[in-house]
Image: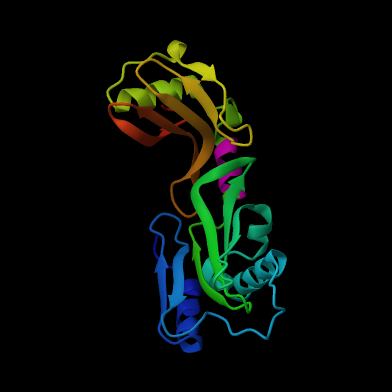
Amino acid sequence: PALTERQKLAVEALRKEVPNIQVEFDAVTGSPRSVMSNARFLTQSEPMPRSLTYEQAMAKVKAYVNTHRNLFLHSGEVLDAAKVTRQDTTAATGLQTLTWEQRAAGLPVYGSFFKANVSKSGEIMMVASEMMRDAEAAAADYLAAHPQTGVRGQISVEEAVAVAAASIGKTVSADEVKSATSPNPKLAYQFFDAPGLSRSWAQQIWLPMNESAARLAWEVNVESSMDGLFTLVVDADTG
């Protein structure tokens, strides 16, 4: 999507604030998928304690989003509603890497994440966002247009696995797709056994179509010893 006037003005302001700022935007969501500079960090912070906590780092990232909400087209509260999927610190440098996964109506939004690198002194080094501006509104619009099926969709997960298998040349019926034990109960995926596949696993998702619309879908992973691993997205209403 084309940049909004707010985003254009925000980029101009950033260029005055940070030398050599580089901003790239996602082609689907219109979010700034890369914000960084090869001249300096994005922020210059006051001295921080020797050990910067994850909570302090996350607060700094949220504050940055709030300050530059015209660039992101949402506030830092969007991160509060997202799921933190990564928090780690590089031992040698103290660099913290934080990643959030966007969710809507209880489901993950496919490929929709926010990532930030924060220095040990609390300076934001880079941010990357592929988040939708309002995923909850997009999900609500979709569900309102599909009142009969809601978040169930027309296509079952077994049917989605069969569709994915067909796309790599395997003939599998939905009836042949059988539930399997998850290798890790903490994983959100459902696991399955099916003829011709070494393994397969799937989860229901929202697939962003543009900056404000999403469709209900299945993320399906199918693997065979002959062909390798494939990840496919199957529309939950049309297949």
- Asked if one can make out residue 154 in the rendered structure from this viewpoint, the answer is no
Q: Position of residue 69 (x, y in %)?
A: 59, 71
58 part of magenta stretch: no
For residue 78, above or below residue 172: below
Q: Position of residue 22 (x, y in %)?
A: 40, 76
Instruction: Give the magenta range.
Output: 136-144
For residue 153, above or below residue 172: below
Q: Quadrant of residue 168?
A: top left
| Image quarter hosting the N terminus | bottom left
Q: Quadrant of residue 226?
A: top left
Is residue 89 left or right of 172 when viewed as pictured?
right
Q: How is the image coloured?
A: rainbow
**Outermost residue, top direction?**
175
Q: Nearer the viewer, residue 24 or 212?
A: 24
Q: Position of residue 206 (x, y in %)?
A: 52, 41
**Residue visible at 68% across and 64% down?**
54
Is residue 78 left or right of 30 when viewed as pictured?
right
139 part of magenta stretch: yes
**Residue visible at 55% across and 33% down?**
189
In terms of secondary structure, what is the magenta stretch mainly? helix
| Image quarter hosting the C terminus | top left
Q: Position of residue 84 (x, y in %)?
A: 63, 53
For residue 161, above or below residue 89: above
For residue 4, above or below residue 163: below
- Asked if one can make out residue 223 in the rendered structure from this viewpoint, the answer is yes
Q: Nearer the viewer, residue 187 or 168?
A: 187
**Residue visible at 54% across and 20% down?**
180
**Residue visible at 54% across and 18% down?**
179
**Outermost residue, front direction?**
92
Mark count? 0
